[in-house]
Image (cartoon, grey):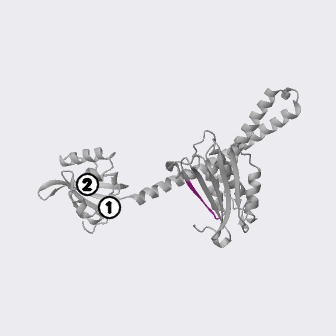
Amino acid sequence: MEEASDGVTITQDEKIVFANGKAAEIFGYSRNELMGLAVVKLIDEKYYPLVKERYEKRLQGMIVPSTYEIEMVTKTGQRVPVELGSTRINYQGRSAVLVILRDIKDRKRVEEERLKLEKLTAVVELATMVGHDLRNPLQSIENAIYYLKTELPCLLASEKGKDMLRVIDNSVNYADKIVRDLHAFSAEKAPALKQTDVNMLVEETLSQIQTLGNVELRTELRELPQVMVDKDQIERVLMNLTLNGIQAMENGGTLTVSTKKAKGFVEISFTDTGVGIPEENMEKIFSPFFTTKARGMGMGLAICKKFVGDNGGTIQVKSEVGKGTTVVVKLPLTQETRGEKQ
């Protein structure tokens, strides 16, 4: 028991009466602290009724599952997933339960990564299929709009006719954006690297964007060396991040786009004074199809992460609810620094 690679405890009267070194390590207590500690303090409350029921049945000699998964609570309050195996024994002349605890954090993490990979594979397959199937009808609608504008000027001269055309045109553009986003995310295309002036690219991108009347757009562009990136991909990133910042400030605010040279990298920062991102959403924001907006598929940030990564860079987000968000894109200065973690 002392040399076991798994945690081992013995419980009597719902208290710990023995614990090996590995069990103490899992729980974050010393072995002396564990002695006499109530089991209820070590089990996540949502699992306690199940554990208690099986504990009592086992003491009565009834057959219950010998191995199952629960979450235990460490001394610092952290939840640790464990595989728990137990059996009834006699200990110092009295009935007790011997418990084997295996920390399965790493196994759970591997399972989660595998599920994410499977989901991502399904997304890529779906994107390829949807993008292919939607392009033809969208083109047909586009052609029909052009014909109507050309051949039926009298009918469409009315405001109602113009409104209907705008609705169709906007809907087609929105559907086309979905197709382009899906294609961009799923396409396995190597970036076309060219020497690029990042400051000039920022200015060109921002010149294409119309801000809301209550949103101020500021730039703080420092002198930079040129970088080897795919200009079209990085322009798409800049566009998405700028629009995200503006949309986060429905009640007005300031979006500051700044650049600077860092060690081996060029940094582009987008800082807004908007609503911020709740902590529970921070891990999901780069996931495909995750969005809190009423309109949109949630592909914007996923595409940004993909494009920045394809160009050897990184993207990081810091946010505080009610105060705003900062997104930092780092692009390598040279081929040698591509892929470095900063």
* Residue drawn at x 74%, y 33% as measured from the top left: 167
- Please report the bounds of the magenta region as a residue range: 312-318
Q: Is residue 66 left or right of residue 210?
A: left
Q: Residue furthest bottom?
A: 336
Q: Position of residue 229 (x, y in %)?
A: 71, 64
The answer to if 316 sits in the magenta stretch is yes
Give the image location of residue 328, x and y in percent.
62, 59
Q: Which residue appears at 83% of the width and 37% of the height?
A: 146
Mark 1 surroundings: few (<14), some (14-19) or many (≥20) residues within 10 A? some
Return the mark for residue 86.
Answer: 2
| Residue 250 found in image quarter | top right
Pair 1/2: label in front:
1
Task: Name the residue type under label 2.
Answer: Ser
Which residue is at 46% across, 55% downward?
111
Residue 66 seen anywhere in this rendered image of the structure: no
Give the x, y percent position of residue 134. Answer: 70, 42
| Most common secondary structure along the magenta stretch | strand
Q: How many marks?
A: 2
In the rendered structure, find residue 288 and report the number of the disc placed on it: none
Q: Amino acid at mark 1?
A: Gly
Q: Which residue is mark 1?
A: 28
Q: CA distance from mark 1 to mark 2?
A: 21 Å
Mark 2: which secondary structure?
Answer: strand
